[in-house]
């Protein structure tokens, strides 16, 4: 019979920067997250980024009352939609 071997594959957890908002996001919330606003060369809009990994950002938002409503993948990017009651 064929020999079956199993290998352990490490699961990589992405680290920052994490995009957390656009130029119309709540400045107070962006401040709480420690986000900085920046514009990429060639873009005519700004985005907010933090150096935290996405899981850290999601934990912070959960502590502020936000809940994940949905998540999807777009290419190699993950997008979470959150809601606060």
Image (cartoon, helix red, strand yellow):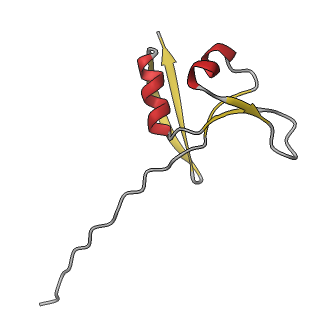
Residue at 87% from the left image edge and 36% from the top image edge: 44
Q: Nearer the viewer, residue 6 or 49?
A: 49
**Left or right, 83 with reference to 21:** left
Looking at this view, name the residue that lies furthest to the top. 85
- Give the vertical position of 75 relative to 43 (above or below): below
Residue at 11% from the left image edge and 90% from the top image edge: 1
**Place of residue 10 in the rendered image (x, y in percent of width and height, measured from the top left):** 35, 62
**Left or right, 85 with reference to 16:** left
**Place of residue 23 in the rendered image (x, y in percent of width and height, measured from the top left):** 76, 25
* Tally of marks: 0
Q: Determine the image quadrant of residue 36.
A: top right
**Left or right, 6 with reference to 12:** left
Q: Nearer the viewer, residue 39 or 70?
A: 39
**Place of residue 49 in the rendered image (x, y in percent of width and height, measured from the top left):** 65, 35
Q: Determine the image quadrant of residue 11.
A: bottom left
Residue at 50% from the left image edge and 39% from the top image edge: 54
Q: Nearer the viewer, residue 14 or 74?
A: 14
Looking at this view, name the residue that lies furthest to the bottom. 1
Residue at 64% from the left image edge and 13% from the top image edge: 28
**Left or right, 41 with reference to 6:** right
- Give the vertical position of 43 relative to 9 (above or below): above
**Place of residue 19 in the rendered image (x, y in percent of width and height, measured from the top left):** 63, 37
């Amino acid at each position: 019979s064929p020999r079956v071997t199993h290998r352990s594959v490490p699961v990589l957890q992405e680290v920052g920067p994490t995009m957390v908002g656009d130029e119309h996001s709540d400045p107070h919330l962006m401040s709480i997250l420690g986000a900085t606003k920046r514009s990429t060369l060639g873009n005519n809009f700004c985005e907010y980024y933090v150096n935290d990994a996405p899981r850290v950002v999601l934990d912070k938002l959960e502590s502020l009352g936000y809940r994940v409503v949905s998540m999807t993948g777009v290419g190699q990017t993950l997008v979470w939609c959150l809601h606060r009651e």
